[in-house]
Image: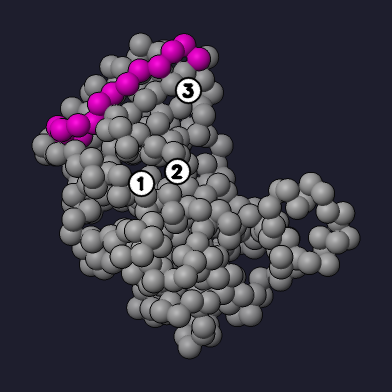
Amino acid sequence: MSERLNAWPSLVYEDLAPMVDYVNRLVQVGGKYTLDEPFEAGWGNIVLDVTPRGLRTPTFRRQGVTFEVHYRLLDGDVVVESDRGSVTVPVSDGSLAAFYASFCDAVADLGVRPPRTSLICEIPGAPRQFEDDQVERIWDGDAARLMWTAFDLAAGGLETWQAPFQGHRPRVGVMWGGFDLSATRYRAHPATPEADRPAFMQNAARDEYVSVGFTFGDAKSPNAGMYAYIWPEPGGLEGRSWGVDGAAWNPDAGLALLPWSTLREAADPRQAIVAFGDAVYEAAVETAGWPADVIGPRCDGWRMSTTPPAAVRGSRDQ
């Protein structure tokens, strides 16, 4: 196998599903603190950063304590770091209920209150609250590393795609409810949410946006890969090119899909993610009237530190 394919590993849903389900539940515990943060369009306030060792919340400043919660997937623990010190909570084997109890006890020593709610969100078939989830789970370190690797590789491509957009764009990160990695672009045009959805979903769809992301898949669609959509969905998306051979429009799901297996075969997988995202935004411009003049130069900071603005404007695609 080539070095390129080794860098972008195979993702088999059946092998990863137990750990994806477990980690999705774990990150909701620390993720609940993000709900106390000022709301950003599309829930940009709740995203978890992909770090060199796992997933981390933003820094919280409340009740006289400054802290963050770091889910270290490569170490099998959760580190809560604050201005008063730090504590480590193992996530080896056990139930979500046991982890939640240990977490609340540990953060209390730092002056951090428990999350304001313990409801489990967006996981079909899950118990109602953390305390109710008594299923004994096994921590699989190899699967955890594979999950982190996929998040890390996909984040690199999404951050590169997102950087030149000059409108509102939350940080690229993992939405702890649905457990997908997302990069989203907004414009201040009100949209009409579906009234039969829960309030948090309606508030996610109050404004028009373009979203590109990564998912491990689920039981109904057990395939990892990139997805993208335009909200509200415009007409004219079928039959379009999506920037990468193998990417296609799925009308039933309302998504453009770029399978992970296709990315692994690309000469430059990160650039393939960028090309996919660019094609999605181009579709938004052509079918939904999104502005074409809000994309700045795509280059690194070294070029911007030495190149006069006039020269940068003359080579925006470099």
Separation of residues labelled 1 and 3 (CA atoms): 23 Å
Q: Nearer the viewer, residue 284 or 52?
A: 52
Q: Residue furthest front?
A: 2
Above or below 160: residue 111: above
Residue placed at 55% from the left, 53% from the top? 159
Going from the N terminus, do you reach mark 2 or mark 1 first? 2
Residue 50, disc: 2
**Residue 301, horizontal then vertical, whole percent:** 71, 48
Identify residue type, mark 3. Phe
Q: Position of residue 1 (x, y in %)?
A: 31, 65
Residue 109: x percent and y percent? 35, 11
Q: Which residue is mark 3?
A: 67
Q: Is residue 248 left or right of residue 24?
A: right
The label shown at residue 30 is none
Give left or right: position of 120 versus 56: left
Circle 3 sits in a helix, a strand or a loop, which is it? strand
In the image: residue 4, left or right of residue 297: left
> How far separated are the C-alphas under marks 2 and 1?
8 Å
- Tag 2 secondary structure: strand
Badge 2, how many Cα within 10 Å: few under 14, some, many 20+?
many
Nearer-the-camera pick, 133 or 189: 133
88 within the magenta span: yes
What residue is shown at x 86% (from left), y 61% (from top)?
A: 311
Q: Which residue is mark 1?
A: 148
Q: Type of residue at label 2?
A: Val
User: Is mark 1 in CB contact (under 8 Å) with mark 3?
Assistant: no
Q: Which residues are magenta?
A: 83-96
Residue at screen point 32% across, 38% down: 73
Residue 302 magenta: no
